Image (spheres, rainbow, N blue to C red):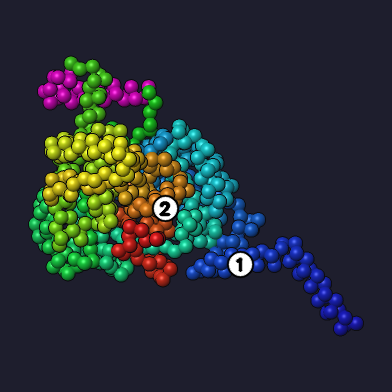
Amino acid sequence: ELRRQPMAGAKSEGRRVEKYLVDHDLEGVVNEVLNVCLRQMPGDPFALLAGLLRERSLAGRGILASSGRVVRDCSGAPALEVEVRTDNGAFLAQVSAARVRAIGARLEPLAAAEALNRDVARFLEGKDPSRTGEVDAGLLGLNVEGTVGVNTVYAASLANWRAGASTRGQKLVKLLAEHGGKREVFIPVPWVSAIELAHEHVGLLPVGAETFEEGIGMCERILAQMRRGVATNSLQVELERLIAAVHELELEHVVRFAIGVRETDVLEPSSSDNMAEPVQDDAGEDAGEEAAAAAHATTDKAKGKTQSQDKEPSAAAEELKEEEQENQAPATHDRAATLAVVNSLLMNDEQAQFVAVVENLFPPGNVLAMKRFVEEFGDFVILINSVNSSLPDESGTDNGDEAGEDAGEDEEKDAQGSEAGEGQVDEEDPSAPGDGSFKVSRPAGEDAEDPQAVCNGERIYVGTPFGSIRTVTELIQYCQDLQDQGTAVVVQWEPCNDVLDTFAVDFSVGLCAGLIRVGQLSSAATVCRVNGLIRLEQELGAEAMYAGNSFASPSR
């Protein structure tokens, strides 16, 4: 009898265990997550298994709460910070208050934080953050064009992607790579600022380094060598000093340059240097014009100018807008002078190797000149330029009368070629160095209004919504489209105000962007991202290669 009791107890326990396994489908679930793990083969399989099992847990409550607050960016200006809280902790994202042109209303940080605490928090509560695409689609269903704002939605999307990666037990970089369709990832080449003048800039690209960390070290050595000399305000002189420093350190076959004019064409005019304002309706615009006119008249009076006092408010406001645009944008002669310097380098057999990227060398309306440049030098130089074919072509103004005449001749030749049914228009050889024009063969019938059909490189901002980009899902799709078309991708936070957020690190690696613009090594935001990339490079190890000389298209 005593022997039978243990046996009966064992059978009862066995039946209880079997029932438990069946009720919770433990065997099926474990087999399923194991198969997923074996297919992905992550570096940390236990983290992935933990995330997959957590998704099947009834205890997973999704997003518990979210909130927004106003913080400060690296210049001291207000910025928006979003916090999304789940069972796994709190996940933060910061978005700058930069006025990069975007479709939809952009709220100043305080209004954005209020909209997030009111409308967005209500929507996010209880949502599964791992379903990033669904959450992003839902965010776009809010009143993005009005009370919520595109920057509010973008910040919430960014924070949710961080929470979603944690919920799935993945690194954010892996989640981004998965959604971007990347089987392998690359560490981007850093674009480090070396020369910063009033309108012109030059960056260092250590394409010949073995690792990102080594490349940063090379840039540091070059900058230290530059600091031994006396800085000037001449781009030509500073470039000569930079080239001399590179030669002295014997890095001429390792480092290339990015040369350009400061980016202003993508910025919206703002009445405040530190804070973006909400997009106004017609009534708001009229009120803004009247206020601007009043301010302008007061300023003129204080300076002893009486002409503006006699003007109508609307005329004075229009004049003020023109003055603001002139102060923001580089003059045409600045572009032409920089283009002449670049042209002289490209025409020099010994120095042409240094030029890797050129930026904003042409006015946005000078589409023909951009195409010529890409066709002549696009095999080894990336052109990044704002494009707006609706603007007048300024090639015949400050660039000289010959450039304007050439443009007219080209139009005639294009027309003749089209009538003859030819697919190619033959033009003269490249012009003499330094004249700011390029005469090469170009295909007829291209779409001049498509920026991606004009330039072979494009900037992607990850710190602010821009264009039609309002969520991380849309940002990923945009990057994929550019890469599918063979366009080189440069990741940067945004053109003016910076914050200490490292999303650019994960995005550039996960989406295989070949270049990341890190800025000046003395900047806190730059150090934040540089350190993040060094850490990520070490963590990924052999899983991620340094893009190096393949920075234009590392994933291909």
Q: Nearer the viewer, residue 289 or 73?
A: 289
Give coordinates of residue 413: x percent, y percent: 24, 38
Q: Residues within 10 Å of mark 1 (few under 14, many from 20)?
A: few
Whether residue 78 is visible to the viewer of this picture, yes or no, is no
Magenta segment's dominant SS is helix
Q: Find out whether the residues at labels 2 and 1 contact each other: C-beta distance under 8 Å.
A: no
Q: Nearer the viewer, residue 397 or 259?
A: 397
Q: Nearer the viewer, residue 492 or 375?
A: 375
* Start-end of magenta stretch: 283-309
Residue name at image x 60 percent, y 52 percent? 61
Answer with mark 2 or mark 1, whichever residue precedes in sequence.
Answer: 1
Residue under label 2: 484
Label 1 secondary element? helix
Residue under label 1: 35
Give coordinates of residue 175: x percent, y percent: 49, 58
Q: Residue furthest front?
A: 420
Q: What label does residue 103 carry, if any? A: none
Quarter where residue 19 is shown? bottom right
Above or below for 472 versus 405? below
Give coordinates of residue 357: x percent, y percent: 25, 54
Give coordinates of residue 459: x percent, y percent: 33, 49
Q: Residues within 10 Å of mark 2 (few under 14, many from 20)?
A: few
Residue name at image x 13 percent, y 38 percent? 402
Residue name at image x 52 percent, y 50 percent? 132
Residue name at image x 47 percent, y 36 percent? 144
Name the mark nearer the viewer: 2 or 1.
Answer: 2
> Is residue 243 located in the magenta-colored stretch of the structure?
no
Q: Disc 2 versus disc 1: distance between alpha carbons?
A: 31 Å
User: The N terminus lies in which quarter of the figure?
Assistant: bottom right
Given the image, on which type of amino acid does mark 2 rest? Answer: Asp
